[in-house]
Image (cartoon, rainbow, N blue to C red):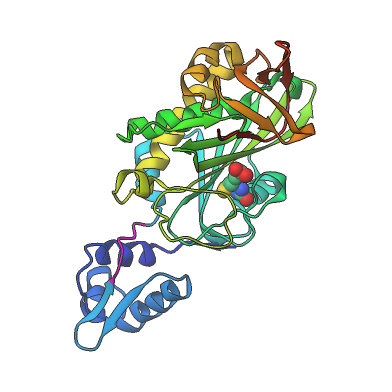
Amino acid sequence: MKEISKSIIEITKLLSDLNFHDGDTLGKKINITRSAVWKIIKKLEEYDIKITSIKNKGYKLEEPLLLIDQQHIERELNNQKFKLEIFETITSTSFYLKQNFNPEKFHICIAETQTNGKGRMQRPWHSPFGQNLYISIAYNFKKDVSELNGLSLVVGIAIIYALKEININEKIKLKWPNDGVFDGKKLFGILIDLISESYSTTTAIIGIGINANMIEDNEKITQQWTSLKKITGNYIDRNKLVISLIHNLDYLLKDFEQFGLRHFINQWFELDALINKEIELTIDNIKGTAKGINEFGHLVLELKNGNQMSFSSGEASIIKK
Ligand code: BTN
């Protein structure tokens, strides 16, 4: 686990114009020595960031790289109720928060890379440095764990609203129960752990991975995937994404706590990637037509015989005709 230094943020910001900059000038601009600049460049290379270095010309990034900037985000959030921790590297932001969350705050943990990021079913979550968003939030509900059905669906809706707020208007949909998809390919995933404190208090550790600027294929990713950059063609400033995500989660989680899932059912139906599609559920290999969700956030399927059944867990895939 390592906290991120201000110098690495500043150097990458200066290099993000994709021009050559020599070590001396870079160092002078942010008050560090040329050899400190060199160390930062080496570190970035260790994280697989592509940098061209040419003698007498200096360093040049091949792709823009704006790192997550704590001061910038805190200025925008401007509220004492948030606690924000940002790490250069960590095993998993969710694992960290499970051990360290502050129940009095909306506690957020972000990392530039995770060495042991986890997805659903204990699958690894590929977390290359500086490219995507790896964020976990600890949120304390004054509710029993049994009243939090459908929380991951509400988090999915909040992510889509956050993307809209930063002008990403492409048709991103939600695939029950935890995925954001575009054109059938996975864009983001949500993994929630619930820690029951007493019969009336539950802390949710909400882990979110959003593919932001990743464009290179990697054999470690077994699912079909896409990223915001692939969809829009633009480099995504993840700081803006974080700010909008926190605002939207803050609003929607409060509404969820007050009104429950029923408040969100219509919004889910508008964003549902599976609605009226022929699908197969991994559990028991059940097939049917997806008919949305019920009041508990369970998936409703219409079977061949016309009966409807609901499912609380499983993974759904659309049957291609
Ligand atoms: C999934 O779709 O399988 C869920 C993916 C969740 C990944 C995020 S990245 C931030 C947080 N830390 C983790 O180890 N996992 C979640």
State the residue at coordinates (58%, 13%): 258
Relative horizontal placement of residue 149, taking residue 187 as reference (left or right): right
Depth check, front residue: 183 or 6: 183
Q: In the picture shown, does residue 237 fall above or below 25?
A: above
Image coords of residue 15 (percent x, y): 26, 67
- On whether residue 176 falls in the magenta region, the answer is no
**Quadrant position of the N terminus in the picture:** bottom right
Q: In the picture shown, does residue 5 fall above or below 271?
A: below
Total marks placed? 0
Depth check, front residue: 38 or 299: 299
The answer to whether residue 109 shows anywhere in this view is: yes
Depth check, front residue: 295 or 136: 295
The answer to whether residue 78 shows anywhere in this view is: no
What segment carries the magenta color? 61-66
Image coords of residue 16 (percent x, y): 26, 62
Relative horizontal placement of residue 303, taking residue 292 as reference (left or right): right
State the residue at coordinates (20%, 74%): 20
Image coords of residue 234 (percent x, y): 28, 49
The quarter of the picture where residue 321 lies is top right
State the residue at coordinates (44%, 38%): 183
The quarter of the picture where residue 214 lies is bottom left
Question: Principal SS element in the magenta part?
Answer: loop
Relative horizontal placement of residue 166, taking residue 259 as reference (left or right): left
**Residue reaching furthest to the front:** 321
The quarter of the picture where residue 182 lies is top left
